[in-house]
Image (cartoon, grey):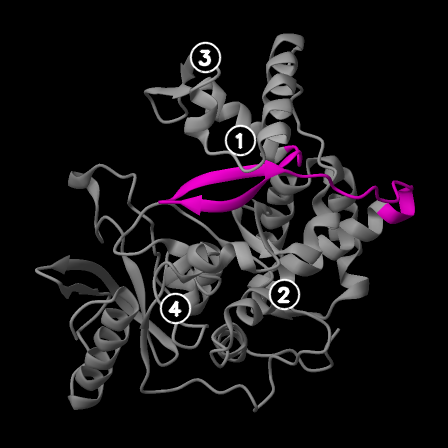
Amino acid sequence: MANRPPTLEQLRRHAIARTLFKPTTLLGAIRRLGFVQADPMRAPARAQDLILMHRVKGYRAGDLEARYARLPVEEDCFVNYGFLPREHLPLLHPRTPKRSWDAATQARAAELLDFVRTRGRTHPRDVLEVFSHGRMAGYWGGELNVSTQLLDGLHYRGQLRVARRDAGTRVYEPMRHAEVDDSPAARQARADALLDLVLQLYAPLPAASLGYLTSLLGYGAPQLRAEARAALKRLPQRQPHALVEGERWFWPDGENPASRRHRVEPERLRWLAPFDPLVWDRRRFERFWGWAYRFEAYTPAAKRTMGHYALPLLWGEQVVGWANLKVSDGRLVPELGFVGPRPRGAVFEQALQQAEQHTAAFLGLQA
């Protein structure tokens, strides 16, 4: 425990400085983050691209998908679905789902797995040409193809991996994970390591948020649910923490939130993805910036207060509002909203222009 607790302002500056690091290579950024959450919605680019735009030098929308097959990176489940360095897979696999397939589903999945093992890289349309497993109700309404859901289930169980994407569609190939030590000590060590990855990605974190993220590890490692809860209880003995304004905060060992070395560019403006590590934790967001940000893509249009895909607007150390980015006639059109008066002066307008130019280049649009 720190001798002198940091202030909330220092925690905020620490959070910004540590996650918006100097742009590096694509693999370097993914390894430094440890996980990049994915989302299929384009507004005007997918969440993973919007996240990497600020952290990869010269990044362009779609670069991750285009280069994925050549990188030691995997699409898989962590606290959410996304991309993580391949070296983290032994912490997550072999994965035991919360719900087992019944005998009939297991038989269909085994037949499908044999097909992919024989064929090699397989697009879902290749499966649909051979198999007819029917349709099922979708999570958000409508119907889903059962064969496609079986592919997803085999991927989740670690028997398939995503080899590449074809126009956004996952192309699968067989996967075999190495055996791991399943002793109680080894299982606990894996849970500790997973919780450390969570902390590395989202720190500094209030205890309540850390508890919620620990529960989300049940998605990526359901077989370690009990061990993850035990790891959370032991975390105060393993990682630094302090009581700040009545709330316990944690950060990774070796970091000092109160350090004067943390620098935030005061005249830099960025719009951040709804799933960016800096804004992902809505509880922390309110502690840091004093207002509630909400992701409203699934909110009926008449009830939205910020817009379909509002991106928090980071101006120096403050999140002063949000932006909905649209493309019209080949040009980027930002629609801005503010929690208070719009910042005045040439400095803000110049920063806004630079953000627009950066994003236009990222999207391959006219400046």
Choose mark 3 or mark 1, whichever is in front: 3
What crowding class fits label 3: few (fewer than 14 Cα within 10 Å), some (14-19), or many (20 or more)? few
Q: Which residues are magenta?
A: 157-186
Q: Which residue is mark 1?
A: 152
Disc 1 is placed on an element classified as helix
Determine which of the numbered discs, if any, sits on residue 250 in the image.
none
Determine which of the numbered discs, if any, sits on residue 200 in the image.
2
The residue that appears at 66% across and 33% down in the rendered structure is: 159
C-alpha distance separating marks 4 and 3: 41 Å
Relative to the observer, which residue lies in front, 304 or 123? 123
Q: Confirm or deny contact between disc 1 and disc 4 (CB under 8 A).
A: no
* Spot occupied by residue 318 in the image (x, y as percentages of width and height): 35, 75
Quarter residue 340 falls in: bottom left
Q: Which residue is mark 4?
A: 53
4 or 2: tag closer to the N-terminus: 4
Q: Which amino acid type is shown beneath numbered disc 4? A: Met
What crowding class fits label 1: few (fewer than 14 Cα within 10 Å), some (14-19), or many (20 or more)? some
Drawn side of residue 241 relative to residue 171, left or right: right
Disc 2 is placed on an element classified as helix
* Spot occupied by residue 356 in the image (x, y as percentages of width and height): 22, 74
Q: Which residue is mark 3?
A: 132
Q: Which amino acid type is shown beneath numbered disc 2? A: Gln
Disc 3 is placed on an element classified as loop
Quarter residue 106 falls in: top right
The residue that appears at 30% across and 69% down in the rendered structure is: 362
